Every structure is written in C-alpha cells, then in structure tokens.
Amino acid sequence: MRILIMGAGGVGGYFGGRLAAAGEEVTFVARGAHLAALRHLGLRVQSRYGDFALPQVQATDDPSDAGLVDLVLFCVKSYDTETAADLIRPNVGPDTAVLTIQNGVDNPEKLATRFGAHRVLPGTTYIEAYVVEPGVVAQPSRLTRIIFGEMTPPTPFSPPLRAGEGDSGGEVSGRCRRIRETLANAGIEGILSEDIWADLWRKYVLVCAFNGLTAVARQPIGAVVRCGPTRQLYLDAMEEVVRVGRASGVRLADDLLQRAIEYTDGLHFDFRSSTQRDVEGGKRLEVEALNGTVVRLGRELDIPTPVNAFLYAILKLIDEGNRGHLNPPT
C-alpha cells in the first residue's frame, strides 16, 4: 500500500515506522531538523514492544513528491489542518482514503470540505509517542490503537453525503477492512467503528480533561488523578464535555465517565499529554480544537462549561505567549 504520513512527529513517526518496517511504501512528511535526520540517518523507534531502526526512509517536506497514494495518515496538529489539507491535494485521487487521527472532533469536516466526505475516514488514536531527538521517536505506553470508520452523518460537524459517495450508514466498509489488515500486518491495533462519532467524542471527553489539566498543572496524569481536588476537576471537565456531546446529538454511554477514570487510573504515573509537552517546550498549543471548542459549543447550546472555560483561558494565555503575541509594547 502506498501511504503518506502527513505529520511525521511522534504519532506519525511511530505508526509510519511500523508500516514501513512491515514493507509498505511509506513517505514521511516532516520539516526542520527532524526531516534532515530522517533523510540522512533514517528513523529510530524506541518502543515498549521492541526498538527498531530504519536506516533509509522516504522523507520530504513536499507531499507532492509522493504522488498519488492509497492512504493518507493525517497526523498534523489541529491548527495546521487546513494548510496541510491543501498541501496533500496532489496525493488524493479517486480511491485515496484520508484517515485523520488528530485531536479534536471537527477535523473530519474540514477535510471533507476539500476532498468530499466519501474520501475521509474519521479516526482517533490511543498512544503515547513523541520525538526524543531529530529522527528518534519514543513510544513508552502499552496502547498503540487506532479507531476509525466511515463518515456517517448526521453529526454536529459532518456534511451530508451525496448519492453514491462511498460506504456509509454505520456499516464497516471494505476499504476499512483492508486498512485494518494493513495495520495489523504492521503490529498496529486497528479497531473498526460502526459509530465513529461516538468513538471520537469518547476520546474527546478524555483528552480535553487530560491534556488541559496536565498542561495547566505541568504535572503528569498520575499526579493529577491522585490529588483529590484535581481529580475532581478532571471528572468535572469530562462531565461538561459529555453534556455538550449529548446535546449535540452524539450517543455517549451512561458509564463513560466511570470507564474514563478507570482507564486514566491504569496509565503509568509519568504519562504526559502532548499539550503538556508543548507547553513545556514553548510550542504552539491545540487550545482551540480541545477546550476552546467545548466552550464554544457550550455557549451555542446554553450549557455551562466553567472548568473547560478556565482551562481554555489559561492555555490560551500560554499559547499567545509561546507564539510571541504578548510582547510588551515598544
């Protein structure tokens, strides 16, 4: 399978590395020092399931170099979605699938407006992966899971499908089965969803609280959930997202919060979210796609979201500072 990894950071680097090691024709899209290392030294992965190295990989900063592909694994930060989508136009043909595993719940709509809903596969991932140094990716956690499915409206974000536009209706499609088989051959757990919007929102409920609190507190998740007051904030933040999701028409199970906290309690103590790593690294934050979207939807639906509003305000301030937007007047 010809595969383009759009955004070959920690997540894209890990999944792309596994796929390339399994013999798939993979092109990594990266930039800066990481791109230079991939080109000259290849890719090294430090994994809980065994380290491996690829001395030579196909890496570029121009997706058009890869030509038409069968699958785009779309892994860029949510604030780069529109820009990255425009860059991959030369890669997307009539039979190309664009599988997004980004944070947030509205990225599939943004991709569908450019490529058509029939080419977009909404997805999410449960993984801890990050770039240790240029050309080196670490994956220390036990989960390496991708959940994905066909784009099946109606949802708060998905545009309507036109007649004849691919598989729909919540059924598992043939192309999804083929992609799952490709992932499995590479040692990646792929789960096919019959209600992908519920699966996206289940992850969203978790990640808004997880990323938001670890980033604001600058503490790993183990510390957050073992301190009584912050554990309660964590639960309150998730409950707000659940209420917004249900009011938006998403089917979320009654025991979702219980399962989410049990999942969190099972993570290793030092697990840091991507947002926490970005805060500590002085990088741009996915603040609008996470807590910002919850706050916006809450206002539209007249649902209070005070915890997420607090997290959004603090992270917005940090983001503005990281981007140099808070410099004192001259």
Image (tube, helix red, strand yellow):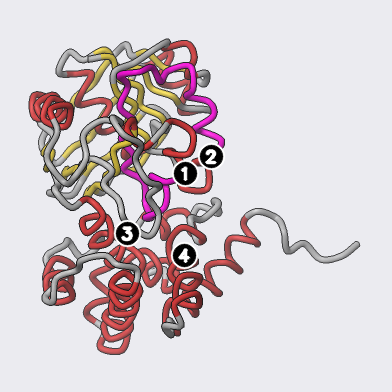
Measured in 3D between alpha carbons, the distance from the residue under mark 4 to the one under mark 3, in whole angstroms, is 22 Å
- Location of residue 71 in the rendering, given as x and y in whole percent from the top left corner: 29, 23
The residue sitting at 19% across, 45% down in the picture is: 169
Identify the amino acid type marked 2: Glu
Q: Which mark is residue 82?
A: 2
Task: Evaluate if marks 1 and 2 touch, with contact meaning CB atoms under 8 Å apart.
Answer: yes
Determine if the magenta segment contains residue 83. yes
At numbered mark 4, what does the secondary structure look like: helix, strand or loop? helix
Q: Nearer the viewer, residue 81 or 189?
A: 81
The residue sitting at 41% across, 68% down in the picture is: 218
Measured in 3D between alpha carbons, the distance from the residue under mark 2 to the one under mark 4, in whole angstroms, is 17 Å
The residue sitting at 35% across, 74% down in the picture is: 244
Measured in 3D between alpha carbons, the distance from the residue under mark 1 to the one under mark 2, in whole angstroms, is 7 Å
Task: Evaluate if marks 2 and 4 touch, with contact meaning CB atoms under 8 Å apart.
Answer: no
Residues in magenta?
82-109
Q: Categorize mark 1 by other alpha carbons within 10 Å: few (<14), some (14-19), many (20+).
A: some
